[in-house]
Amino acid sequence: MDDDGQWSEGLISAARMVAAATHSLCEAANAMVQGHASEEKLVAAAKEVAGSTAALLVACKVKADPGSVAMHRLQELQAQEEILRKEKELEKARLNLAKIRKGRYKEKPEDCDDSSSSF
């Protein structure tokens, strides 16, 4: 088989993986809404979609013209994906900080309250 044929088969295979992962994501979301699945299952399915989509993008890049409009759009999508990933990391860090602060607040002795005066 020539390189183009092998690349075509790889591209088709990658696209099928995206379709299967997307189907699993839809099933997980439906099951979660009905109370039959956990959030973890939904997250795992979403990660599978992301992974298979990344593999498809790699397959596309192999034959793509780096200066093409499609590649420029792809780079813009990758930038948006990176922004969303960073925003999610930031939100996770904020929640962690809030948890730490809440823990410190609970540990603070009540007699340290400056607003109460004892006569």
Image: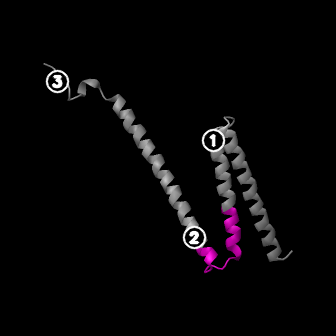
- Work out how far the residue at label 3 is from the one at label 2, CA to CA, in angstroms: 62 Å
Q: Which residues are magenta?
A: 54-72
Across and down, in percent, residue 94 comes to 43, 46
Name the element at disc 2: helix
Name the element at disc 3: loop
Mark 1 or mark 3: whose residue is earlier in sequence = 1
Which image quadrant for residue 54? bottom right
> Which residue is under mark 3?
117
Residue 66, compared with residue 106, is above or below; it is below
Left or right: residue 53 compared with residue 115: right
Residue at 67% across, 66% down = 57
- Work out how far the residue at label 1 is from the one at label 3, CA to CA, in angstroms: 50 Å
Q: Amino acid at mark 3?
A: Ser
| Quadrant that contains the C terminus | top left
Residue at 67% across, 60% down = 53
Which image quadrant for residue 55? bottom right
Number of residue marks: 3
Across and down, in percent, residue 61 comes to 67, 72
Q: Amino acid at mark 2?
A: Gln
Residue nearer the viewer, 108 or 34: 34
> Which residue is under mark 1?
40
Mark 3 or mark 2: whose residue is earlier in sequence = 2
Left or right: residue 31 compared with residue 93: right
Instruction: Check disc 2: other Cα within 10 Å, few if <14, some if 14-19, many if 20+.
Output: few
Instruction: Check disc 3: other Cα within 10 Å, few if <14, some if 14-19, many if 20+.
Output: few
> Which residue is under mark 2?
75
Residue 66, compared with residue 30, is above or below; it is below
